[in-house]
């Protein structure tokens, strides 16, 4: 350091003869002060340089330690809040009678959202009920007709037995020569004719019994025709019930101004949307290289960009079995020679704990940052692999 000082002061002494021969005392003091300050500045720079050289190994050691012991938490900002949402609609067509909610209103499960004009559906229901009553009367008449047919068949069977007796008598008289041939022929004709009538009555009775399902004592409510009419009544009642549209779950309605009383809505037309605010989750798409130790059930901390001072806790609910691009309409096809490897992203779902009512409400689509505690730091082997493996790949 003394040599450096002498070398530094030497130029000052060499320059002295070039100055005027006679210097004022103040100028001499200023020159000596400037030289001293310059010497001190150089000494400070030398000391800072030595300190930096001494801190460099320490910084490297600390950095390696942090890298080796870190990596336990997988973090990604490619994540968004998601919630159940449904387009409110109904499967019948009709004219909007009234709207019972307002834009961005919170509704509970089963709360009325809007109504359609029920008049046409009430008429259809009354018609179906009348048809049901008529069907019951028809079935009762069918049962009575069957009993009458059976009775007629029994009477006709008695007539056939009488005709059979008359035929046998006429045959005996014809053989004995007492009765003429015409009497015998008339007996045969009457017997055959009455047998035909008996067979027809029995066929009609069987046909009527078949209409009763093979059971003459069947209950009216068990008959297929009655059940068909009852189904028509149930369908008409269902359509009438669907003129009142209720909330399938609690949440917030949005897009309500899209409909108004008097507007015609076709079946399955979305009137507005209902978003669930109680059942929310986070869909994240981290890089595939970040999912090495991520497993379902691991604890996660979620920070929402809208509320930077609050944290939500949750767990990894599931990890997709395929990368996101596998579900695209036109997946990438790397068949050319100029192939470039691109890191893929794999969807992951985080189930949030929203039981703390002191936390602000979450909205679907909000951007979040997800930190998943994998419980697995990088470790020295991974550090050496990343260090020397990268160098090998460079070579």
Image (cartoon, rainbow, N blue to C red):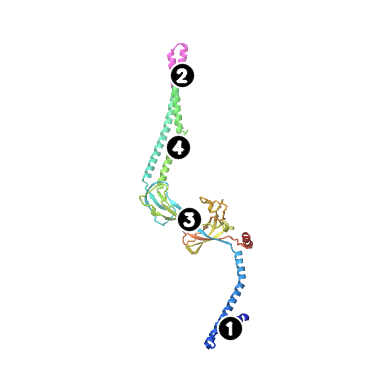
Query: Which residue is at 55% across, 53% downward?
Result: 323
Q: Name the residue under label 4.
A: 224
Instruction: Say which element carries label 2.
Output: helix
Tell me residue 159's x, y (percent): 44, 22
Residue 39 quadrant: bottom right
Indicate whether 179 appears above or below 26: above
Label 4 with label 3: CB-CB less than 8 Å: no
Q: Mark number for residue 83?
A: 3
Question: Upstream in the sequence, badge 2 or badge 4?
Answer: 2
Image depth: mark 2 or mark 1 in front: 1
Indicate whether 378 appears above or below 227: below
Q: Name the residue under label 1.
A: 14
Q: Mark number for residue 340?
A: none
Image depth: mark 4 or mark 3 in front: 3
Neighbor class of circle 4 (other Cα within 10 Å; few <14, some 14-19, many 20+) is some
Highlighted magenta segment, given as a residue range: 166-193
Image depth: mark 2 or mark 3 in front: 3
Question: Upstream in the sequence, badge 4 or badge 3?
Answer: 3
- Report the predominant secondary structure element of the magenta stretch: helix
Tell me residue 98's x, y (percent): 37, 51
Viewer-closest of 329 and 259: 329
Q: How many labels does the image show?
A: 4
Q: Name the residue under label 2.
A: 165
Label 2 with label 4: CB-CB less than 8 Å: no
Instruction: Say which element carries label 4.
Output: helix
Question: Upstream in the sequence, badge 4 or badge 1?
Answer: 1
Question: Upstream in the sequence, badge 2 or badge 3?
Answer: 3
- Quarter of the image with the C terminus is bottom right
Image depth: mark 4 or mark 1 in front: 1
Whole-Å distance between the Cαs marked 4 and 3?
A: 46 Å
Question: Upstream in the sequence, badge 2 or badge 1?
Answer: 1
């Amino acid at each position: 350091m003394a040599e450096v000082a002498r070398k530094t002061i030497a130029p000052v002494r060499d320059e002295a003869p070039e100055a005027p021969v006679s210097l004022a005392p103040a100028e001499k003091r200023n020159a000596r002060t400037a030289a001293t300050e310059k010497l001190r500045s150089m000494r400070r720079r030398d000391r800072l340089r030595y300190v930096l050289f001494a801190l460099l190994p320490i910084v490297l050691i600390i950095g390696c330690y942090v890298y080796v012991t870190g990596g336990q938490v997988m973090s990604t900002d490619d994540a968004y809040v998601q919630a159940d949402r449904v387009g409110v609609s109904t499967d019948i067509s009709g004219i909007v009678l009234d709207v019972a909610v307002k834009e961005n209103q919170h509704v509970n499960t089963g709360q009325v959202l809007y109504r359609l004009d029920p008049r046409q559906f009430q008429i259809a229901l009354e018609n179906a009920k009348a048809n049901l009553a008529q069907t019951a009367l028809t079935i009762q008449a069918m049962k009575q007709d069957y009993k009458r047919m059976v009775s007629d068949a029994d009477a006709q069977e008695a007539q056939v037995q009488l005709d059979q007796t008359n035929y046998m008598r006429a045959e005996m008289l014809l053989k004995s020569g007492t009765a003429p041939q015409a009497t015998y022929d008339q007996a045969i004709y009457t017997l055959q004719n009455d047998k035909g009538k008996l067979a027809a009555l029995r066929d009609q009775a069987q046909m009527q019994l078949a209409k009763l399902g093979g059971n003459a004592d069947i209950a009216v409510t068990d008959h297929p025709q009655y059940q068909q009419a009852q189904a028509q009544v149930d369908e008409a009642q269902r359509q009438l019930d669907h003129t009142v549209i209720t909330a399938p779950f609690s949440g917030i309605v949005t897009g309500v101004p899209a409909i108004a009383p008097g507007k015609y809505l076709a079946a399955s037309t979305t009137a507005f949307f209902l978003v669930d605010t109680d059942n929310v989750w986070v869909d994240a798409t981290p890089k595939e290289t970040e999912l090495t130790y991520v497993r379902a059930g691991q604890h996660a901390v979620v920070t929402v960009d809208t509320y930077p001072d609050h944290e939500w806790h949750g767990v990894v609910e599931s990890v997709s079995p395929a990368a996101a691009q596998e579900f695209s309409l036109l997946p990438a096809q790397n068949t050319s020679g100029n192939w470039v490897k691109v890191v893929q992203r794999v969807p992951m779902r985080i189930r949030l704990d929203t039981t703390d009512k002191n936390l602000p409400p979450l909205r679907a689509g909000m951007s979040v940052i997800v930190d998943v505690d994998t419980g697995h730091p990088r470790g020295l082997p991974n550090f050496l692999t990343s260090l020397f493996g990268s160098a090998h790949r460079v070579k």
